[in-house]
Amino acid sequence: MASSLRIDGLRAGYGSVRVIHDLSLRVGEGETVALLGTNGNGKSTLMHCIMGVVRPGAGRIVAKLDGIEHDLAGKAPHQIVQLGIALVPEGRHLFPRLTVDENLLLGAHRSDARRRIAENLELCFETFPALAQRRDQLAGSMSGGEQQMLALARALMTAPRILLVDEPSVGLSPLLVAQVIAKIEELKRRFGLTVLMAEQNLAQAIRIADRGYVIVHGRIEFEGASREELAKNDLVKRLYLGL
């Protein structure tokens, strides 16, 4: 179940405002790649481009699945999800007046996932035991950490091959951030996922990233071949550590 992602020369924005400038990056099979950047530098826009929510003005977004390349640029979001690509969005975007069960079932709209609803529900509750105890609870009444777990579980319900995670640490305490990051790593290893994680919490991101990129004003300004390179880079130190 090989899966990888390649972006070449991407340009994108909103109307006349360009946000992404000639951006290129790679996420290899089974990798967790961190996209590091502070707020307003284009991380979410890039994620939305990959998912077809924002149409790029130029460049290519190619997902390779089992040896077959799929050009995502120009595809609709539902077509991209159907390929096995799932996004855990910044802010979670759950349905607050629906229960945990109902939110999870809404994630199972991909054809492969519909055939495996019972199996995937069992996997979700095994991976996130707290959700099993709250199946009938309204999502909007849960804590921030529980909601983030539910957002991850909803993505798991799509039976994804490539998982995009946008700012999983937003609004969470340091302890909950550490728990969520650990769960992302667990999901990657357990289900053989390829993961691109946009994050501004350097210390937590490099705990699980194989390598990563730093995005500044919509451009990749540094590519680290390992988590050690990321941690030691002067630009990273200046942006995140104030050194």
Image (cartoon, rainbow, N blue to C red):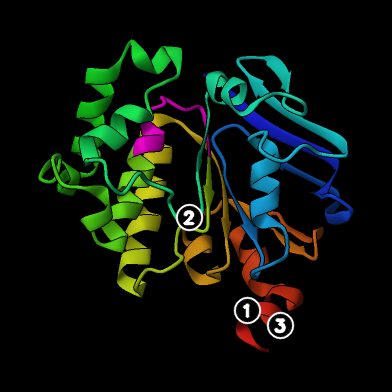
Stretch of the chain drawn in magenta? 154-163
Report the mark closest to the observer, 3 or 2: 3
List x then y, in percent, for residue 203. Answer: 50, 71
Vertical placement of 173 versus 21: above or below? below
Q: Residue furthest left?
A: 133
The disc labelled 1 sits on which kind of residue?
Tyr
**Marks 3 & 2, CB-CB < 8 Å contact:** no
List x then y, in percent, for residue 159. Answer: 41, 24
Quick one: label 1 or label 2, which is nearer the N terminus? 2
Residue lying at 60% horizontally and 15% vertically, measured from the top left: 66
List x then y, in percent, for residue 88. Answer: 47, 45
Q: Which residue is mark 2?
A: 208
* Label 1 neighbour load within 10 Å: few <14, some 14-19, many 20+: some
The disc labelled 3 sits on which kind of residue?
Arg
Report the mark closest to the observer, 1 or 2: 1
Q: CA distance from mark 3 to mark 2?
A: 22 Å
Question: In the picture, which quadrant includes the C terminus?
Answer: bottom right
**The quadrant where residue 69 appears:** top right
* Label 2 neighbour load within 10 Å: few <14, some 14-19, many 20+: many
Report whether 218 appears left or right of 33.
Answer: right
**Which of these two is toward me, 100 or 112?**
100
Q: Which mark is residue 160?
A: none
Residue 215 forms part of the magenta stretch = no
Q: Which residue is mark 1?
A: 240
Q: Is residue 27 visible?
A: no
List x then y, in percent, for residue 141. Answer: 22, 57
Q: How many marks?
A: 3
Q: Which residue is mark 3?
A: 238
